[in-house]
Amino acid sequence: EQIKKGNYDHFMQKEIHEQPHSLTTTMRGRLRDKSVVLGGLKDHLKTIRHSRRIIFVGCGTSYNAALAARPFLEELSGIPVTMELASDLLDRKGPIYREDTAVFVSQSGETADTLLALEYALSNGALCVGITNTVGSTLARKTHCGVHINAGCEIGVASTKAYTSQIVVITIMALAIGADSISTQSRRESIINSLSDLPDKVREVLRLDNEMKDLAESLMQMQSLLVFGRGYNYATALEGALKVKEVALMHSEGMLAGEMKHGPLALVDETLPIIVIATRDACFSQQQSVIQQLHARKGRLIVMCSSGDAASVCSGGSCRLIEVPLVADCLQPVINIIPLQLLAYHLTVLRGYDVDQPRNLAKSVTTQ
Ligand code: G6P
């Protein structure tokens, strides 16, 4: 086992640091200069473009990855994209039609709820697409078509490198679906360029490791942690909080910053740590005003911002900063989750918990 971990103490740590490489593998052979190629989808793109709705179905981290990529898919396809947690879709027997494309996202390809939701969508006649890391998995076999994320075997129960590869694959899928539109051509080309730069940017953000360890030391005694995000980074807030609760066993909630005034604001005091994701994108000014409101209530803030933006995000009071490299808006979630993965990892080690086998959790939940 130690041989497989190489120079790392834990699989989760290894898998976090592997991301420049896993993302390179995910993209290999799929990016051209001005277009993308997804062999597993090419015969179905026309059907997808004509579908009435695209429905993402998944659990846990896989659901969050789809949520992170959703805005870009909506933008490029012009098709309504809805989100379903597999168990909730099954509980409600939510309506699914033949005109729908249902996209099932699962690292293992064996999660029981996701597979049952797949059976349900198949019986309703939807086109079913699978996105998985596991060749030959039930999900890969039972869907009509799909894409392998090729992130390499993930062993840590908390998913890290699969998350970033899932976002990248769904982004490439959005580029493929939108490839017939002239009006989005230059936007697509600029995202394809940013995808090629992404592994280097991930390498850059991984240099925050020591800083995140430091932050973890200052937070290790806390009972609770909130993470606020919106837009592309709403998913980052959910996923960052999920990492902290699943491995560091610390209560943590990811919240939509736009909902702050409708409840969460009541929790704000001088002690509760709050991470606000405020990297540059179309929601930046809304996040600046969220920070001001939290400052006004003397919140204990940790702000994630784009490099060089310290003065613009933290003028009204004191806060701790996490400065990350700026990439294209729809790819920023890939960068922003990494400091939070590192934070969750260090919190877990410092609090003395099992990093790779968190209490009560399984890598793949194969029963309902
Ligand atoms: C379990 C794992 C999570 C994972 C979820 C979905 O809860 O602990 O890390 O995100 O299952 O798994 P899947 O294999 O379907 O992505």
Image (cartoon, helix red, strand yellow):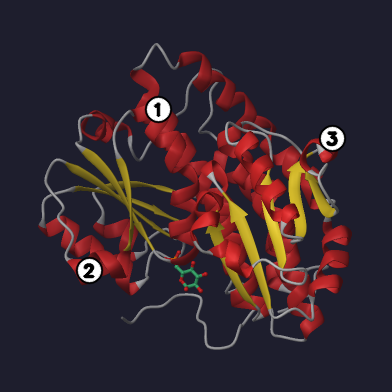
From the image, tell me which residue sits under label 3: 308
Element at badge 3?
loop
Q: Do the residues labelled 1 and 3 touch (CB within 8 Å)?
A: no
From the image, tell me which residue sits under label 2: 90
| Percent of width and height locating residue 299 | 74, 61
Amino acid type at image mark 3: Gly
Q: Compare residues 231 and 15 and report the one nearer the observer.
A: 231
Q: Compare residues 227 and 168 and report the one nearer the observer.
A: 227
Tell me which label, 2 or 1, sits earlier in the chain. 1
Amino acid type at image mark 1: Leu
**Farthest residue in the top direction?**
182
From the image, tell me which residue sits under label 1: 76
Element at badge 1?
helix
Task: In the rendered structure, find residue 59 and report the number of the disc placed on it.
Answer: none
Q: Residues within 10 Å of mark 3 (few under 14, many from 20)?
A: few
Q: How crowded is mark 1: few (under 14 residues within 10 Å), some or many (20 or more)?
A: many
Q: The C terminus appears in which quarter of the rendering?
A: bottom left
Element at badge 2?
helix
Tell me what residue is drawn at x 66 percent, y 42 percent. Answer: 289
Tell me what residue is drawn at x 61 percent, y 55 percent. Answer: 228
Q: Are marks 3 and 2 in contact (CB under 8 Å)?
A: no
| Percent of width and height locating residue 83 | 34, 52
